[in-house]
Every structure is written in structure tokens, then in C-alpha cells.
Image: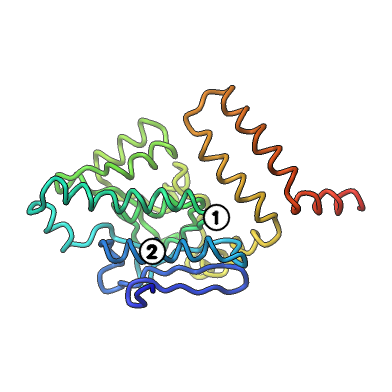
Amino acid sequence: MIPAALVLYEVSDGIGRITLNRPEKRNALNAELIAALKEALRRADHDEHVRAVVLTGAGPDFCAGADLEALRKVAASSVDENLADARLLMELFMLIRQIRVPVVAAVQGRALAGGCGLATACDLVLAARSARFGYPEVKIGFVPAMVMAILRRNLSEKKAFELITLGSEISAEEAGRLGLVNRVFNDENFAAEVQAIARQFEKVGRSAVSLAKQLLYQIDGMDFANALQCGVDVNVIARMTEECRQGVERFLKR
């Protein structure tokens, strides 16, 4: 079962809502929270009524990165222990891409370090105008290593280098201009705007969105010919789905 103290999960109107629930710790990540979050994502993926997942944080911040207690353990841990711990976050980032439904990060307050990585690992990132993003790991001699794989796929090399080596926070507007954020909304309308965008996934084919998501991430790094061949394969799969057949019938009857 998902520990209610760490992650809240509910489904309403086809939207699975996952809330990081450690507001007293600014929703900082530790092994227990990561495990609970992975379980919630799997639940949403297996629920045929869920068309999209909205991921947010309780309290004023989205996620401030690694838990301080977890950081204290780093220096005292062995190589194998640190490797196992790092893989927990890697598995979370992979899971977000692997589940069939879109995952939408709704960011209010600060999304820093691993919290910034968590937000940008999602398929869409929506931000309140007051939100702040950044990778401050270098300020304590740490490397934003796994989140770099996400950052490099979203930004130019020069901008990525600037963010990961200076450790500066940036505004939601700047994150939007750089490509880390899809859309920025005023704080007072943020919840309603997130709801409206998430509800748009009810109007499109669930299997089509799932196949499109899978293909988009699968072709990353492929050469042009292989990417086209993957497109051919997914095109054929999509044609054979009942969802596509019904959609074509409705279109032809217009």
C-alpha cells in the first residue's frame, strides 16, 4: 500500500492526481518517498479510467531535491550502497517515461536539484509564475548527474552547461523561454489551468497518446532512417487498434 503520509493518490474525472506529501520537508526526496511515488505511478498506469497524471507537491514547494538526512548518509555509505540509492532515482525517471499515460508536472514554489529533475522528467511541465527552478548541486560539491540526461534533451548544450555549473535558480518565465517548461500561468489561476490542460487528454485517443509517447522517447538518439522505420511500425500498430478504426469511421461520417 502507498504510505498516505508520503504520497497522496486519487482519481477524479479521468485524472490521476499524485501529491508529494512532505510539506514540512519541502517534499524532499528520500528512498521511501521515491518508492511510494513509483507505486502511485504504476497504479495510474494500470487504471484504464486514467487519461493523464498530474504530479504536484503539498505546501508551498514542488520538491526541494534530496532529503538532508539522505545526504548525510552519502559520505558514510559504501560504493555499493550509494549505487543502489542512486538507482532508485534513475528507476523513477525511467518509469515516468515508460508508463502509458502522460505525466504532467504542476510546479508551484521551488523545484530544485532532484526536484527540478523530477519535474522535467515529466511529459509536460506547467508552472505557476512564482515557481523557481534550478540545479544547485555544485554548490555543495555534488554533480547533477542523472538529471543531466533529462536536461540535455531539453536545452542547448550551452544553456545546459550554464545551469548545471553555476547552480543558479531561474524563474518560471526563464524556464519557459529555455524549453524546460511548457506553459506558465498566474498563481491565482494555476489550479484551474492545470485542470483544463489535463482534461484535454479526455478528448484524444488513449492508445494513440500512449503509442505517440512511446515512439517519441524511443527514437531519441536514433538516426533518421531508423527513426522512420520505428514510425512505420507504430503507424501499423495504430491502424490496427479499435480506437483508430472507430475514429476513422466517425471522421468519414462527418
In-image side of 175 versus 254 (left or right): left
Q: Quadrant of residue 25?
A: bottom left
Q: Secondary structure at mark 1?
A: loop
- What residue is shown at x 25% (from left), y 45% (from top)? 167
Q: What mark, if any, has residue 237 been given in the picture? A: none
Closer-to-camera residue (231/12): 231
Q: Amino acid at mark 1?
A: Pro
Q: Secondary structure at mark 2?
A: helix
Q: Where is mark 1, residue-wise?
A: 102
| Location of residue 48 in the rendering, given as x and y in whole percent from the top left corner | 61, 64
Given the current orientation, which residue lies at the most extreme right position?
253
Q: Quadrant of the N terminus?
A: bottom left
Closer-to-camera residue (106/252): 252
| Location of residue 96 in the rendering, given as x and y in whole percent from the top left corner | 45, 53
- What residue is shown at x 70% (from left), y 55% (from top)? 204
Q: What mark, if any, has residue 37 been given in the picture? A: 2
* Mark nearer the N terminus (2 vs 1): 2
Mark 2 neighbour class, 10 Å CA radius: few under 14, some 14 to 19, many 20 or more: many
- What residue is shown at x 51% (from left), y 52% (from top)? 124
In the image, residue 187 above or below residue 74 = below
| Location of residue 3 in the rendering, given as x and y in whole percent from the top left corner | 34, 75
